[in-house]
Amino acid sequence: MRVMVLGGDGFCGWPSALHLSAAGHDVTIVDSLVRREIDCELGVRSLTPIHEPAERLAAWREVSGHDIDLVGLDIAHEYDEFAELLAAVRPDTVVHFAEQRAAPYSMKSPRHKRYTVDNNINGTHNLLTAVVALGLDVHIVHLGTMGVYGYESVPVDLPEGYLTVSYPGRDGKMYSREILYPTQPGSVYHLTKSLDQLLFQFYARNDGVRITDLHQGIVWGTQTGETARDPRLINRFDYDGDFGTVLNRFLVEAAIGFPLTVHGTGGQTRAFININDSIRCIRMAVESGDTVCGAVRVMNQITETHRVADLARLVAGALGGEVHPVPNPRQEADENQLAARNDRLLALGLKPIPLDSCLLTAEADIARKYCDRVDTGRIPSRSYWNETRKSVVEEQEV
Amino acid sequence: MRVMVLGGDGFCGWPSALHLSAAGHDVTIVDSLVRREIDCELGVRSLTPIHEPAERLAAWREVSGHDIDLVGLDIAHEYDEFAELLAAVRPDTVVHFAEQRAAPYSMKSPRHKRYTVDNNINGTHNLLTAVVALGLDVHIVHLGTMGVYGYESVPVDLPEGYLTVSYPGRDGKMYSREILYPTQPGSVYHLTKSLDQLLFQFYARNDGVRITDLHQGIVWGTQTGETARDPRLINRFDYDGDFGTVLNRFLVEAAIGFPLTVHGTGGQTRAFININDSIRCIRMAVESGDTVCGAVRVMNQITETHRVADLARLVAGALGGEVHPVPNPRQEADENQLAARNDRLLALGLKPIPLDSCLLTAEADIARKYCDRVDTGRIPSRSYWNETRKSVVEEQEV
């Protein structure tokens, strides 16, 4: 299959591109490389020493014998070039990772909020418009987020994308209808993925575009079977307050002997998935594209859920370290329940890798190996969701 | 009250700005004047001879004694200037009309789709971001559309923005929750107003921004008490296939002795409101801003609903003319039911102006007065919703 991977130089995009290439697909990466620029902007770098794109691709050719093309292009702002590329490559599948993906980064300042909305919405919409204009029969696989669902007050197992609800008609009878799950995004970043859902709904209905939206949980882990084949292929590992995700932050903190910082009570329950499962899910979504028609296919790309405080205790137990609560910069509930279905990916063959202490130890080894690259000043999140959160955090820190 | 009217040079914006000024509010118009450029792009002009912005404002000063400022600025792409202006004016209310508002225009080509999404989403988001960044206590009144609701299969009176639905929890019990009405937009334009709803939901929740979203029906009529005070104040009247709305198109067709063109069976039911009611609703929304807190206030800005075929017969009966079905360029149901609540604006004092033959005759007089300005080639809509609609229309026209 010809697969175009938008955002194929990033944390999920890179190992997915390699995994698809290893599986025999003909992969073209399209990436503006803005994520590397953001490292410069923030004055931070991946814990792992990632290599330049050209070195990565040369290394992959050496170890696998497969070629991957990389086109440097901003899909949100270079529409004509992007449409030309789509017309030339005529992919069977486009995997779309090309969005700003960090909630704290999206909340840092007016500029960051505006960048996230402009980049993510125009990028997704340019893809949809170009596919329709070119009349391509292409399957779009998009990385969404579990964050579109928000955190429910109703004790429900989150379904996959859709919810059947009842409400009274004017005749007093109850009627049922299946709707997109009502979205309650908790950051500008999550908001953009909620907006994406409506873009997808419209283009699926009006133009019959075939789309899979993968609502992914928080990814943990770094290396995959493919990225571990050569040091030049090593994957990105973010630990900073903007792009670092919670479990990876705990691993770095444990590795360098820092307290494990939990936001607030740690009562937030979140969904998780290992990077190796994530890339396999992407491949399964790509390879099952023929079955997508009509409404957007939504699949929850998760394997388990944990309370953040429990995760911290698990890491502390396996690797040593103390758990240390810090004021929460985010506007969110202190505590929530979360349970979600992942039947669709299980049916496609997902065999979840459980979060256990052996794997944590292996990940901690990576963190220890590169711990001289850690800038501890960059671990705390300094993105406040609003003025109230900022004052609360500043007061508590005094 | 200090009121900033974004898009205050347009069809609804201009008479609203005058009406607010006449009511004693201190009005600043912000407008990029792109709507006048689009007339040039499409090679069409308002049926009524609208005057240059400076002439309009001078005329208003002469007849009313009130000053209105006009700032030429593109809120979607000149953020810094827009934020500076907000900081200088410090409005109590911002009325937001500054969006591309024609469904057919939004569907003409990839460029038009992309322009509509980019302009409307970035414009709305820039406003929200700036208001939060500046810490302004401002009430935003936004012109939404009834089109966000889509057309229901369930016989329901469309509520105002929210719907209480029930669904089973994991314990098998039924739970109730109030959600934003599930959106089913029918064009890229309507899609952008659905996206706006999610932007508003987020900024109301995260930052406490006070917002009223007015879901307006199709506006008919041209002149208002204020615009009729001087010929230089005359309002825009669009009759072309892109910006002309259905009733105004019928009036022009009747005035020039053309058949009244109905898309398809004319079985589409739509909601309507007279321009004079529309501007009064805007004023009522502005003046009741103190009551808005917490969730976004949504009000349906409509007064009645009609089947399009019935409207055509009503106009033909009052003014003469034949009704002529033409192939429908839009991807939409041939027939739909529509009934909607408008209790909130009624409670604020709305006294609906009914669509009757006297008013139609008065509107037809305007159409007849300027009928030498009509380019009949511009009446049909040549914007096809998708390739299927295009082929169907072309086949039927052969």
Image: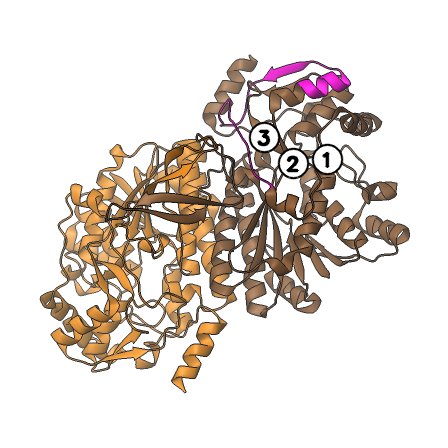
Chain colours: A orange, B brown
As drawn, the residue found furthest toward the bottom would be A398
- Dot 1: element: loop
How far across and how far down the image is residue A191, in percent? 43, 55
- Residue B300, visible in the rendered structure: no
Residue range corresponding to the magenta coloring: B313-342
Q: Is disc 1 surrounded by few (<14), some (14 to 19) or many (20+) residues within 10 Å?
A: some
Marks 1 and 2, the one that precedes in the sequence: 2
Residue B56: within the magenta?
no
Return the residue nearer the eye: B382 or A315: A315
Question: Is B131 on the left-hand or right-hand side of A262?
Answer: right
Whether tag 1 and tag 2 are in contact, CB under 8 A, the answer is yes
User: Which numbered dot is residue A167?
Assistant: none
Q: Nearer the viewer, residue B389 or B281?
A: B281
Magenta: predominant secondary structure element? Answer: loop
Badge 3 is on which residue?
B270
Chain on which label 2 sits: B
- Which numbered disc flags the more N-terminal residue, 3 or 1? 3
Which residue does the numbered mark 1 point to in the structure image?
Answer: B353
| Count of numbered badges drawn on the protein | 3
B71 vs A8, left or right, is right
Indicate which disc, 2 or 3, sits on the residue closer to the N terminus: 3
Q: Marks 1 and 2, Cα distance to the nearest angstrom?
A: 8 Å
The chain letter under disc 3 is B
Q: Which mark is residue B303?
A: 2
